[in-house]
Structures are given as C-alpha cells and as structure tokens.
Amino acid sequence: MSDTPVDTSKRTWLIASGCAGAVGAGFTAVPFVSSFQPSERAKAAGAPVEADISALKPGEKMTVEWRGKPVWIVRRTPEQVAELPKIDSLLADPKSERKPDELTPAYARNEGRSIKPEYLVVVGICSHLGCSPSDKFQAGPQPSLPDNWQGGFLCPCHGSTFDLAGRVFKNKPAPDNLEVPPHMFVSDTRLLIGEDKKA
Amino acid sequence: MAEFKEISPNASATEKLVNWFDNRFPTANKQYREHMSEYYAPKNFNFWYFFGSLAMLVLVIQIVTGIFLVMHYKPDAAKAFESVEYIMRDVPWGWLVRYMHSTGASAFFVVVYLHMYRGLIYGSYRKPRELVWIFGCAIFLVLMAEAFMGYLLPWGQMSYWGAQVIVNLFAAVPFVGPDLALLIRGDYVVSDATLNRFFSFHVIAVPLVLLGLVAAHILALHDVGSNNPDGVEIKAGPKDANGNPVDGIPFHPFYTVHDMFGVAVFLMVFSAIIFFAPEFGGYFLEYNNFIPADPLKTPAHIAPVWYFTPFYSMLRAITSEMMYALIACVLLAAGFGVLKARLTGLTKAVLAVAAVVAVVLMLSIDAKFWGVVVMGGAVIILFFLPWLDNSPVKSIRYRPGWHKWVYGVFVVNFVVLAYLGVQPPSPIGERVSQVGTLFYFGFFLLMPWWSRLGEFKPVPERITFAAH
Amino acid sequence: MKKLILTLVAAFGVVLGAHASGGEGIVWDKAPSNTNDLPALQNGAKLFVNYCLNCHSAAFMRYNRLRDIGLTEQQIKDNLLFGDAKVGDTMKSVIDPKQAKEWFGANPPDLTVIARSRSGHGGTGADYIYTYLRTYYRDNSKATGWNNLAFPNVGMPHALWELQGQREPVYESRDVHGHQTQVFTGWKQVSPGTLTPLQYDQAVGDLVGYLQWMGEPEQNNRVRVGVWVLIFLGVLTVFTWRLNAAFWKNIH
C-alpha cells in the first residue's frame, strides 16, 4: 500500500449500495409474496349463501356449501332438543366455553347452540383433522358408538363423536365442538349462511 | 478424511463453520475463485460489455415471474385468456408480475441483440472462442423458440394466428411438411392440444435447455478467457508476480461492482416501461391480443412480435420474382468459383453440378418453401461467422475506417427489415426488403473476401486503457 | 460510429415514416383524458350498466372493483346491480349468444378490454370508441336502420340514440387528388335527442373514460407506484455509480 490515507469511499458506497439494494429487494419481494394471498375471485366465492329450509322435516338434515365447506342444517325434533342437557357430563366442552370467538357466536351460546332450538347450523368438518363426520341420528347401541347413544355424528377417520348440538364427546381425538358459522334467518323459511345481525 | 484441512481451536465460530463446509464441499470455494475472484478479465471493458450480465439478469427475471404466473394461469383454450385477465385484476399485484414478464420478453431480445452486436464488432467469435459463439447462437435459436411458444399462451388473436402461420411454415417443407405440422400442433389446426404442449415446453423443457446452454456458454468462455474491445489477448501479454495477466483484473470485485451499476441503469429503463408504458405503443403487448382467439376470424393485419420481424421480412421478400435474383446469385457464385477461384478440378466439377442441382430445385419448388429456407438460413448463417471472417485483425478498432460504415449499414439494414416486417405488405416495402435480404446475406457470404480488403491499422501489443 | 448509425436510422425513419394510414372509416377524434376524474368515471359506469350491459358482457370486471372509482358497496348494490347479481360477481350480460348472433350477425363482443384492443394507427382505443359512439347515422338500407362512419356496416344498432337523437351525414363533392369525391363535411340533426350535442359528447366522453379505466383498473395506481420506484432506482443508480468509481479509482 502507498502512503495515501486509508480510502473509506469503497466502504461508504458499499454500505450505501448494500442498504439500498436490501431495501429494494424487500420492496420487490412484497408484491410477489402478496400474490399468494386469496384473490378477488376467491374472496367473492366466499360470499354468503342462502338456504331454503321450507322442505326440511323434523329429524332431517340438509347440506349447503359455503366457502367450499359443507354446512349442515339439522331440524331437530323436540325430543332430540330435550335430550341435549342430559348428556352434558359426557361432553368435553358442554357449555361451549373453548374458543368462543372462533366456534360459537353469541346467539349460539345456549344449550342447543342455535338461534332457534329447532334448527342446528354447524360446519360439517371434524375439529380433529378435517374429515366430514357421518350422520348417526338413530339412537341406541351401534358399532363404534356407546350403548346410550342419543343421536349425533361419528367421524369415520379417527372415531370422534359429536352430539346433535355439534358438541364433541370426551376422550375423543377431536378437541373442539363443531363450528357454528355466522348465520341469520332472513325469513322463517330462509337462512343466510355467512352473514349475521351484528348486535 | 486425510485431506481435511485442520483449523486452530482458537478460530472464531464463523471460521470453523466455513472450514467444516469447505472440507466437505471444496468445489464451492474452488468454483468461486476460478470464476469470480481469480478470473482475470481484461481491464478495458466498455459499454458493450454490460449486456452479457444483463441477459443473465433478464433470464432470472423471466423465470421468477414465470413461476408466479404459472400459479394462476390456466393452459386451457377455454380458460387461458380469462386467466390472464384474472391475474391482471383479481390476483394481488398480479398486474405487476404480468407486465414484468411481458416487458422482460422484449427486454431479453434487446439485450441479446446488443450482446451479439458486441461479439460482431470486436471479433469475439474468433479463435479460440468459436465454441462460445456457437453456444451463443444456439441460445439465440432456443430463445426464439421459447418466446414463440410463450406468445401462444395468452390465447389472444395474435397468439393464435401468429402460431397458425408459423406452424404452417413447417408444412412448406417438401414431402414431410404437412405431417410435421400435424405433429407439432397435435391437431389439424392450432387448438387446445397445441396450447397445452407449448405450455409444457415453454415452462419447463425449453428453460432447462436454455439454462444448460447458458452454463456451457459461460464455462467455455472462462476456459479461454474473455476478449476485449482492442482484440488483444491479455494472456499473451506480460504477467505479474502471481502469473496473472497484467492487463487483466479479477472479475470480482471489479466487474461485479461494474455490472451492478449496469443493472441499476437497466432496471430504471425496465421499470419506466413497466409502470408508464407497458404496451410500448403496441409493440410489447400487441393490441390485437386483447381480443380472445377466434379460429373463424383472422385479424386484418397479422405480424409477428417485433423481435422476429427482421427475419419475417426476409421470409416475405422471397417471392417468385426474387427467386430469379437468387438463381442469378447462385450462378454468379458458381461461375466465379469455377472460372476464377484457385480450387482443384474435382472441386470445381462438384461446384458446377451442385449449382445446376440448386437452380433446378429453385425453379421447381415453390417460393414459399425457399422463403422458409432463407428465414432459417438468416439465423443459421450466424453459426458460421468464425469461418467467414477473414480479417487479419480481430476488433473493428484496427480495421480500415470504411469497415465501420459497412457494419453501420448492416445495423440500419437490420432495423429497416424489422420495421418493414411490422408493416403490412406493400410494393415499395417488398423491394426494399428484397434489397435488404440480399445485403444481409451478402454481408456474411462475401465476408471471406471483403473482410480482407483495405488498409489495416497496426494492432497494439497491450490493451488501450484510460484510467477512470 | 454511433453518430453514423443514428444519422442513417433517422434518415430512413423520415423516408419510411410518411405512409398513409388508410383503412376503413374516418379519422378518429381524440377522446378526453379523464381516467383520474372520479365523477366522470362514475357517470360512465352508470351509462355502461344501463345502456351496454344488456347485450355486451364485461366478464372480467367485478362489480365491487367499482370501489376504486369512489363508490361504496352499498352505492353499487343500490344503483348498479340488476337482477340477482351480487356485488362480488363479474359483469355478465343476460343475452343469449345464439339469439344475439341471429339478430345482429355476431355475438356482441365482451367489452372488458375493448379500449385496449381497438388501439391502432389512428389513435388509442378510447379515441376510436369515442369517435364510433358519436358517428352513428340513420341508414334504412341496413337491418338495424343504423350505420356508422367509424365502422361502416356495423351490425350494432345505435344503443344511445335516445340521448343523441337521429342524425344524417352531409357530403360535399370536392376535388381530391384530381378526381371528384364525396367528402364528409358535417351532420344534419333529423330529430333531437334528450341531450344537446355538447351534453351528448360529454356523456360519451364519460362512458369512454369508464371503458378506458375498466380495461385496466390498476392504471392510475400503476403510475403512482412507478414514480416511487423510479425515484428509488435513481438513488440506487447514483450509489452503484459511486461504488463502481470507488473501486476503479486506483486501476491504471
């Protein structure tokens, strides 16, 4: 090296360019990563869905698709509604106290987990790993079900069971009750799934 | 394990980590030294030497934006056009990814043409770099195929009809033509089958080939060392104490930093186009391509994308009239070879017979076929450049002054041919492109003769370098 | 050598630049530039939904994108949605394509990107549409009763005739390039519309502005972002230039 003083310009510009380059790279990455987010089409497809329940008879279930998921509307008989409080001791979360904001809107925080006791509205996806449980509305002993079975749902994948209010039984792989989606009655015969009356 | 390098236990954690890695993958550091920190490139690179690294940058941009586009694009004739508009409107920032890809395609050709021109003027294709040039010509050919197939994907009117016309060119080949076209299309006309296979080629097959060729191109270059604007071999000059050419400097950090500046300027131009004029007057995104493909209705005016138009002009220039001019050229060349050139009697006989066969073929086969031959030939002739150039001097700097005018006319001619290719056919346009085609081929085919004419300037022993 | 190339290119450019743009139809007027004028765009959206959407779809345009021109979802639902369309849906028309082809000779094309596709030598796509919507005239020899100076023998009737009224073109015999030709010199208003000519031109200007915006809703945002990007890159260019100079300073 010669006797000239130490040259700091290289370092200065290296740092300046390095910082500017890093900032630029960051700003460039943002649009690309954002393009992963749900598109407008996906968001529009997630819009609320109407269901006509006029033909639903007591003891029957109908399914509508909302946001790609099955939503069950079960018209419970008065007997089925009456049985619900009696099995509280068999359930993991009978009062729906776990994750209320995610699973049970305010108008469903009751024994039947519904607006009207007659109509149960739940998302038909098991809270364990996402399979769709099968209907087991018949009461009494059956394979994979206890002898005092009152009716509900059985998930075929790993054996979790849910009652006719979508509440999960104790000691099953599924940790949570079935999700009650936002919903409201636009009339006595029409349900709107995906939207509710905000208090 | 015996070859593992030991490191002092007092070394820092970073040094130990680097040592661990280096013991198991010495190639990494070895290649870095061979191709970056100890690759000695000539000091005197100028403006024309930016375009190689820029070409690599554009390749990366196209691959990355391409990956993101494929997440949303649908390669189905019924859904393709819609999926592109979906990207433009419904995908967050999709419009930016799309514009980067469409502008990048045109930018690729601008950069590659300038990069090739550098090779032309400085004699970078000459011994010992002939293979670097050949790999480069192969890249050019493959790039044209990639761009052509990519252009079908938006499934607009230009996409569809451009593909229809070009695939039909293959049908012009005698005997196997129609079957060849059927094989390429996968159907009797350009259809969903064509779209799907072009998608596969454009997204994976051809990019892999391109990456392989680029690697070969750069490795072959590094094996023999880079040329420079003076055409003086730095390896033949004096060496320093470590055996490195005195007229060279390590690529890293000097040219990495130099190229970063080139990248910044390029990105400014690139971004200005993307954000302020993505259609670029209808040259980068053609207006007709905003109409979904309609197999029943051809647009009034089809032209290939601008980067193909010089060759398209040459294709259109070959009319039955032009065939007579070409036949005359063949006869002249053969006549000269037989009467004036110093060749053996056998060679002259073969030449005469070949000329007669050629003329017979040119009279019997349609001009349409010869148009395809000329268009293809215009690209293939580039491969032969190292053997056509007979100049005693490599770089244009030391050639006779008037050679510069010849190169200048070549460039203007190329641009004029490009312009004419975009226009609809016209009588004047036809004449000018015919003259232009003859000049283009004359430039190359007569190069063994004209590259040796004139007073050459003495080539210096050392490169000319002006301190920055 | 660079100067030589530039001179030659310029010379050729001059020689070859002067070629007739020819083609069908009259010279296009310039459309007003109003893609930043939100009230104009909103008026254009209203006209589009009321007069165009019956036959033409805009299948790639979502209703809720109209938020970008200053409308709320409620305003869109109340004023611009017809039938059972939802605000997240795309603008589809309800016309049956087969019937449309029978009636008009061709299925009315989708208009989402019409302003981008109609650009040409005569001007931008917006210029063309602006001219087209203002050069309809009564022509009883046509099935629809209408013809158009910008698109002769068009199959589309004058959708906006109630606003513009009925007009006929006036021709004058003039000597052009040595022979007598009929030259278009102006319009004759046969029956009035609900708008004055000036109001009609403004309405069409708004509609065309809307079509131009709908062709690329991101356009205003694109330019805004671009300004910042270029400023940043300018700074980066200066930094890399000085960095390069710092390294090469000592190379001789």
Image (cartoon, helix red, strand yellow):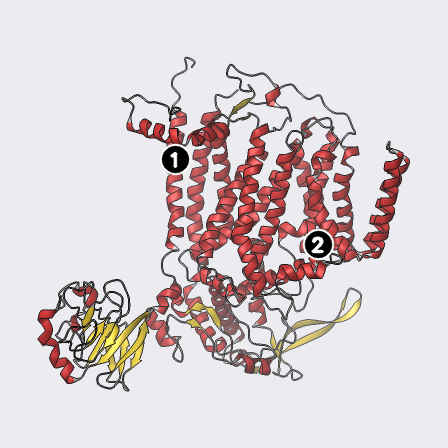
The reply to whether dot 2 and dot 1 touch (C-beta < 8 Å) is: no
Q: Residue at x 60, y 68 (%)?
A: B294
Q: Quadrant of the C terminus of chain A?
A: bottom left
Q: Residues within 10 Å of mark 1 (few under 14, many from 20)?
A: some
* Labels in figure, total: 2
Label 2 – label 1 distance at C-alpha? 50 Å
Q: Residue at x 41, y 64 (%)?
A: C38
Q: Is residue A23 visible?
A: yes
Q: In the image, is residue A6 above or below residue B270?
A: above
- Identify the subunit bearing mark 2: C
Which mark, residue A188?
none
Front residue of this view, candidates C62 and C223: C62
Comparing labels 2 and 1, the label whose residue is closer to the camera: 1
* Residue receiving disc 1: A18
Q: Residues within 10 Å of mark 2 (few under 14, many from 20)?
A: few
- Identify the subunit bearing mark 1: A
The image quarter in which residue A84 lies: bottom left
SS at mark 1 in the image = helix
The image quarter in which residue B238 lies: top right
The outermost residue toward the top is A3
Residue B336 image position (x, y, % from top left): 87, 38
Inspect the image, locate mark 2, and give the three-letter code of the amino acid beneath it.
Ala
Inspect the image, locate mark 1, and give the three-letter code of the amino acid beneath it.
Gly
* Residue receiving disc 2: C18
